[in-house]
Amino acid sequence: MSLITTEQVVLDLTGADRHDATATLARTLVASGRCTDLDAFLADVRERESKMATGLPGGIGIPHARSAAITEPSLVFGRATDGIDWGAKDGPARLIFLIAAPEGGGDAHMQMLPKLAKALMNKDFRAALENATSEAEVVDIVDRHVRLDPPAESAEPAELADAPRPPETGRENAAAGATAVAATASPAPESAEPTTDARPADRPLTLVGVTSCPTGIAHTYMAAEALENAAREAGHTITVETQGSAGSTPLTAEQIAAADAVIFAHDVEVRDKARFAGKPTVDVGVKRAISDGPALVAEAGRLAAEWQADPSKAAAAPSTEMATKVDSTGGVGTRVRQWLMTGVSYMIPFVAAGGILIALGFMLAQIFGGKNGAIDVTKLYTLDPGSTAQGVTVLQNNFNPLDGMHWAALLFLIGAAAFGFLVPILSGFIAYSIADRPGLVPGIVGGAVAVTMQAGFLGGIVTGFLGGFLARWIAGWKVPKGVRGVMPVVVIPLLSTLITVGIFITLVGRPIKALSDALTQALNSMNGASAIVLGLILGAMMGFDLGGPVNKVAYTFATTGLAAAGTATNAPQLKIMAATMAAGMVAPLGMALATTVRPRLFSEPEQENGKAAWLLGASFISEGAIPFAAADPWRVIVSSVAGSSVTGALCMAFGATLRAPHGGIWVLPLIGNFAMFIIALIVGVAITAALVVLLKQTDKNRVAVAGAA
């Protein structure tokens, strides 16, 4: 199939402006039967031009669009002797290619774009077009550089750039999918002078880049070619990921890790930008790469040298995308825990926002006349926690800003709405950590169904793992090329959601609900000695490894339990959360107190850590005690476990409650029976501090040093 015919060549192109000239070129497509609606196609081209002018340095214009009016991938060439203003800064365009792509793309479309981009960066190609004397000669020149592969020999197109991959799969061919532009192409047009005085690197660099433009048709690939040429001329290597309509397999984690610097040349947001966190980055528009590739490569070299000299810059680099907490090289048990913790970490902000708002609503209700924390807005309605929509409607129609009870109801309603997302978010992000974005839909929908079936957070955990593994499995299917484009947006979410929810409703939902009901009943029946024992165990777990796996298991049990507590005022789950947070504050506060009381038993760095541990402990950051445990493990851990377990037991015995999953002293007003909470905390801190001092005094060397000081 030929992209261009003699009918699609205009050697003496004229026009009042670029839009007029584009219309002249487009009419040739109508004449050749490749355009079914001239006005529709021109409207699509004009819309593309409104996003960014398509004139390029060196006298080139590349108007282009994907359109439903185009029947097959096509090129139209026009040569304007006097030039036509196409928006390039260096002057009018003399060589114009109108690129017409069908709305659905296709294999030919995917081949055409990179090949034309490379050809336009080639001086010999441009010179041949300038000197062509006939339409047939132009067709021959274009066919030699932009010839489509025969169907029998056509290479499989790369995965679409935005097609998510299951973790740990497809990596072996990723390098081939990232754009490797032809080595024979020439550098970018010389008409644009470098705009930076950045010095080149003094050693060969390994670079990576990402290019993208609003439609992903021409600029994306021309920018990639220009960067490849500039890097080669400077003695460096670069691999560019083209996030365009032709697609490419994303850069691998290994390629990114090995890169000295990154170049982004884009006019739309770079997808999965978090992959490049911690790397020196040059970030410019796509045209800048086409016109000024050598300067961008030099700038990347300068930044790489700066970051190598100052590693703290890499440590401070932010990550801007959703991240998981999964180590793909870890064992099965490690990854299961990390998958679960990813879901919990994304759920916690909903718990915090919803819990604090509900607690504030109850506080206001008590102040303005509520009975036992029940919110009654001037007796118009009694809010059912499971019927937020009803409450919203009534409050919307009757809200009185001068009535404190109405404000209490507003806070309560918003908090209850946030709590409605706890299980779906937990489930969705467990699935996300397993299968990346394909896991979100089955995970979130499955979690919502678990809520409907009253299967609680256990149901959310099950649907999260089930949806994640199903999505990951389906994403790994080998499917025909024509189906690949719809896999991430249609096939994976459709099938994984259907199977996940179907299995949960028909097979596992009822047993999980029964288990959840049994757990809730067991917690509700706990009182006296059984509650104290549970607090003792949770406290010991919180104090054992100070933010490690055991600590996280206890914390996860407490935070996920908040989802089952709902809006009850004295649920056992609220007591568990209070006991867990208090116990987690003990170790750093105990170490801080010990360094204050007996500073000579501690080294100078430990004394400094003790000062910081006051704030860390008060803020419920157990990790504040890690420096002490690292220096003297058994004494510190024994002391921490003893104090934390006592605090957990006392909190349960005293009936302290807490809706917020974090915060320490900063959420003290939201703690039920907070005076006893403080007493339990003080007792545990005192035990930890006294015990660690006593144990350290058994170390003769340490005592001798203390005595000498």
Image (cartoon, helix red, strand yellow):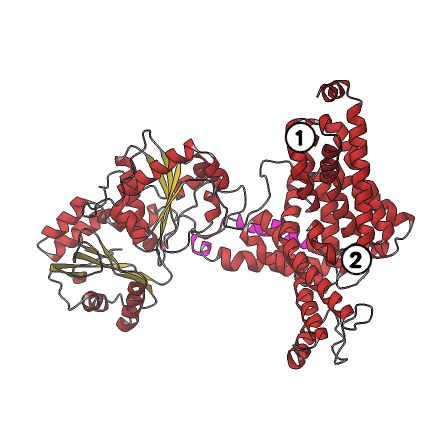
Q: Which residues are magenta?
A: 462-484
Residue 50 location, quadrant:
bottom left
Does 43 appear above or below 79? Answer: below
At label 1, which amino acid type do we have?
Answer: Glu
Q: Which residue is mark 2?
A: 672
At label 2, which amino acid type do we have?
Answer: Gly
Which sits in the foreground, 287 or 141? Answer: 287
Quarter containing the C terminus: top right
Most common secondary structure along the magenta stretch: helix
Which sits in the foreground, 90 or 408? Answer: 408
Q: Which residue is mark 1?
A: 606
First of labels 1, 2 by sequence position:
1
Task: Report the side of 284 relative to 3 (left or right).
Answer: right
Secondary structure beneath dot 1 equals helix
Which sits in the foreground, 127 or 83? Answer: 83
User: Does the CB distance between marks 1 and 2 fall below 8 Å?
Assistant: no
Whether residue 508 is visible:
no
Spatial distance from mark 1 to mark 2, Cα to Cα?
A: 35 Å
Q: Look at discs 1 and 2 and give the one toward the viewer.
A: 1
Does 283 appear above or below 40? Answer: above
Number of residues whose C-alpha sits closer than 10 Å to that of mark 2, classed few (under 14), some (14–19) or many (20 or more): many
